[in-house]
Amino acid sequence: MKNSTLRFVLVLFISSMISLSAFASQHTVSKDPNRVAQYNDLQLAIDDAANGDTILVYGSTTGYGNINVYKPLVLIGEGYNENLGLVASIATLTISRFNSTLAADGSTIMGFNITSSITYTTDYSGATDETRNLSDITVLRCKVRDFNFGNYYGYDNFVNLNIINCVITEDIGLNQYYTTFDDGQDIVFSNCIFDGSRIYGNMTREAGTLTVYEDLSNVRIYNSLFLNYETGLLNNTVGLVFEDNVFFGHELYSSDYAQITWNNNLFYLADQAVSDLLTNENVGSGNLIDVNPLFTTYPATPEAFSYAHDYTLQAGSPALTASVEGGEIGIFGGAYPFAVGAKPPVPQVTEVTIQDGTSSVPVGGTINFNFKAESGN
């Protein structure tokens, strides 16, 4: 038995010990010819899986293409940090509703590098306003270029969508171009790194009064880090909530915005006057303005995200006690402290040693081995 095969068996064995689903099956996917799995096509594995199943996806030098998750599943990739080995890459990940009774509701997706975008959509043949909804979906420890919410042409109702411990490198599209007040968006970003990101909404003013807009008051961003960007974070956005975040060198807006809530955030080296954020129907309190967060390792002038940076706060940082609850703000505070670049929080085998040096055994034979594993965190 080859070591790669043995490693696969152990990963499968360990994963079966986690209570991801009491009666679910596990499936494995690999595009690496040296790592054995049941599938080499991730979409086929998704199509074959039953509701509630878990799919384990190996890292590979070859990506897994465009993927559509339209049923409740747990997808676990090997991680997005190339410094720790092969990564599990997807181009476009669509999280969708298949029909009036089947959707990705209840899914968890973790440990992937999404090189294009994650799109949440409820559009399908025969859809009605009453059936255009997605709920209870978590994206965890992924690196994602863009997030898009909605199909731009109709009603979408999103409930309890959570994005946790992710690195987001470009845009977040929350704009519904052809709707007014109808769409419901209950979306929470927790302990994420926004690396040069822009957030797009939809609003129109007439004579200074809002007439048509997308109400984003249920889109909340907690305990996150916004790094260097020069073309503006807010673009026609209404009602977002920012709480317990750190903004380091980020241009804060490039177009109109209104009714934004800013509570207990820290702003440093911003390109615009932070005082502008509390005008134009915006509200907030407890913010630290023009205050250095004192990261452990970070350049004096803003730079893009890097694994070489250490975003933990030095002793004496004012951000250590600045949150709404009196604790730490930024990515290491709150409910989901960020392990930067870490693999998914599930047990993983790190070393396998065959005790007697045997490379194969006959059917029914015995092989002795030791293995080491990380518990996950």
Image (cartoon, rainbow, N blue to C red):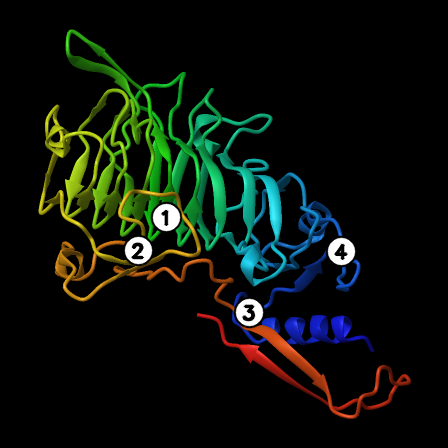
Asked which secondary structure carries label 1, the reply is strand
Q: Please identify, in this view, whether the residue under mark 1 or under mark 3 is nearer the observer.
A: 1
Q: Between disc 4 and disc 3, whose residue precedes?
A: 3
Label 2: which residue? 331
Q: Between disc 2 and disc 1, whose residue precedes?
A: 1
Q: In this view, does 166 lie to the left or right of 228?
A: right
Q: Give the residue displayed 77% in from the left and 72% down from the top.
A: 5
Q: Please identify, in this view, whether the residue under mark 1 or under mark 4 is nearer the observer.
A: 1
Label 3: which residue? 22
User: Mark 2 and mark 4: span between their CA atoms?
Assistant: 36 Å
Q: Give the residue displayed 76% in from the left and 53% down from the top.
A: 40
Label 1: which residue? 193
Res 267 → quadrant: top left
Residue 101: tell me if it is visible. Answer: no
Q: Against 63, is 280 above or below? A: above
User: Mark 2 and mark 3: span between their CA atoms?
Assistant: 32 Å
